[in-house]
Image (cartoon, rainbow, N blue to C red):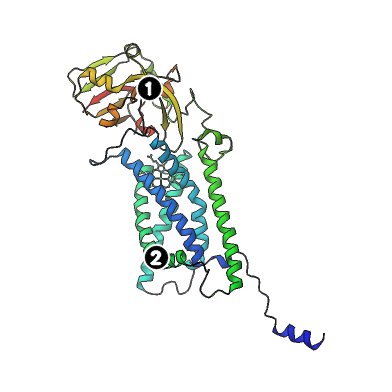
């Protein structure tokens, strides 16, 4: 080796190839994934709270009957976005996990408080994703009520997230403003880090998108064949529409729906109580509406429903304009044996006591002899096997 080569050898810096990933446990990656997570979480929050308000309306909230398919979209978006969140949350946890093991674990009191909020934040988020996904997969490995636990976990997570985002506001602001990876990075490491980060974020986005596409087919039929993760296959159905609760699941119900003594009764705050057999209802003016069953679990399916308008029955009974109506099922027990039609839903032209689906008599699993169907309502409020309308 000549002397020039020796000099070059002496000054060449040691070559260290950072492993893919090490460079990505940084604040910019954390902030970018965090912002995507925050946006998706906000969509889940808005659509979830809406679903809660529709099912448990406070005095100031009246859910409109139009547009007819709004709930179908909002709850479909809730479940699909929630499932698509899973890789984003995992990516975020992977980026920041070295920070959880740093030493010393806390710097001062403010730092201790901030780190404590991570417990409800991470715990709440994992609980929401797990409970939601298990629920739509009809797997209930718990004793508690899913909607109640899911609802309160939401507010715990929201509180922790507000605290977390406030604590990280400076970093998030810096990330939004700056394109540099880290202040101390050299141009070379910045370029490689940016390329690595792009690949990583691209992989997370692809995983998230794949989960979404693999789920939406439970509603969007053209994608049904590739939606392997959608717990509900719309092609498995009775009379064109999937069934969540079959008549055989409630004791004594199959006999009650087949009984010749079946009557639909209209009572409560009316001038005249009314009672109809199914044949009486079939002899009345019939109306057909194309409406979806939009399940709280995110799937939905449209059908042509034919039957008697609820508002026609209310007018016959002499109910006052703007009345609300309780709809009671033949079921003796069960959380969804009754529902309420607010004034807008009760008066809507397409709110029906349906007798037929897609031109055929209702199958008992779809609510024979009579079921409620109305626009823009969660499936759990489309009461099957209707026995009574109680005007309020
Ligand atoms: C991660 C963020 C999430 C938030 C903030 C959130 C929030 C909510 C809220 C507030 C409700 C209303 C509960 C009630 O009616 O009292 C709800 C309902 C629901 N969520 Fe989520 N959720 C999230 C993720 C998920 C995921 C990942 C899934 C499923 C994959 C899911 C599935 C459901 C279902 C099926 C309901 C309807 C429950 C019912 O009415 O029976 N959620 N969600």
Q: Relative to residue 387, is residue 45 depicted above or below?
A: below
The residue lying furthest to the bottom in this view is 3
The residue lying furthest to the right in this view is 1
Disc tally is 2
The residue lying furthest to the left in this view is 271
> Which quarter of the figure has residue 260?
top left
> Which quarter of the figure has residue 17?
bottom right
Residue at left offset 27%, top offset 27%: 347
Residues at marks 1 and 2, CA–CA distance in whole angstroms = 57 Å
Q: Relative to residue 176, is residue 291 depicted above or below?
A: above
Q: Quadrant of the N terminus?
A: bottom right
* Residue for badge 2: 169
For residue 152, say whether it is visible: yes
Q: Quadrant of ligand 1?
A: top left
Q: Secondary structure at mark 2?
A: helix
x and y percent of residue 78 in the render? 43, 44
Q: Secondary structure at mark 1?
A: helix
Q: Quadrant of the C terminus?
A: top left
x and y percent of residue 67 in the render? 36, 34
x and y percent of residue 332 in the render? 32, 26
For residue 145, say whether it is visible: no
Callout 1 touching callout 2 (CB < 8 Å) = no
* Residue for badge 1: 253
């Amino acid at each position: 080796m000549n002397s020039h080569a020796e000099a070059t050898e002496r000054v060449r810096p040691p070559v260290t190839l950072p492993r893919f990933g090490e460079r990505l446990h940084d604040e910019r990656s954390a902030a970018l994934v965090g912002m995507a997570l925050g946006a998706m979480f906000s969509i889940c929050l808005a659509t979830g709270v809406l679903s809660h308000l529709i099912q448990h309306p406070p005095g100031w909230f009246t859910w409109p009957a139009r547009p007819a398919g709004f709930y179908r979209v909002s709850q479909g978006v809730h479940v699909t976005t929630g499932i698509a969140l899973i890789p984003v949350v995992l990516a975020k946890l992977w980026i920041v996990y070295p920070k959880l093991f740093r030493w010393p674990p806390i710097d001062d009191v403010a730092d201790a408080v901030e780190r404590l909020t991570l417990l409800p934040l991470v715990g709440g988020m994992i609980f929401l994703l797990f409970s939601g996904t298990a629920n739509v997969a009809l797997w209930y490995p718990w004793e508690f009520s899913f909607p109640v636990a899911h609802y309160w976990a939401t507010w715990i997570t929201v509180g922790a997230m507000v605290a977390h985002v406030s604590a990280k506001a400076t970093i998030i602001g810096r990330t939004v403003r700056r394109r540099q990876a880290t202040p101390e990075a050299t141009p070379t490491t910045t370029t490689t880090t940016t390329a690595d980060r792009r690949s990583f974020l691209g992989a997370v986005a692809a995983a998230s998108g794949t989960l979404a596409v693999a789920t939406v087919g439970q509603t969007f039929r053209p994608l049904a064949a590739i939606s392997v993760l959608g717990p509900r296959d719309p092609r498995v159905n009775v009379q064109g529409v999937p069934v969540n609760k079959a008549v055989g699941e409630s004791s004594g119900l199959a006999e009650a729906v087949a009984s010749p003594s079946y009557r639909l009764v209209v009572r409560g705050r009316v001038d005249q109580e009314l009672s109809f057999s199914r044949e009486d209802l079939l002899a009345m003016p019939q109306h057909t509406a194309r409406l979806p069953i939009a399940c709280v679990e995110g799937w939905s399916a449209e059908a042509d429903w034919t039957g008697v308008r609820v508002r026609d029955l209310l007018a016959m009974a002499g109910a006052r304009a703007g009345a609300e109506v309780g709809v009671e099922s033949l079921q003796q027990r069960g959380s969804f044996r009754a529902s309420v039609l607010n004034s807008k839903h009760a008066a809507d032209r397409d709110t029906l006591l349906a007798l037929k689906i897609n031109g055929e008599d209702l199958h008992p699993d779809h609510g024979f002899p009579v079921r409620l169907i109305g626009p823009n309502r969660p499936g759990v409020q489309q009461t099957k096997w209707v026995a009574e309308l109680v005007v309020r």
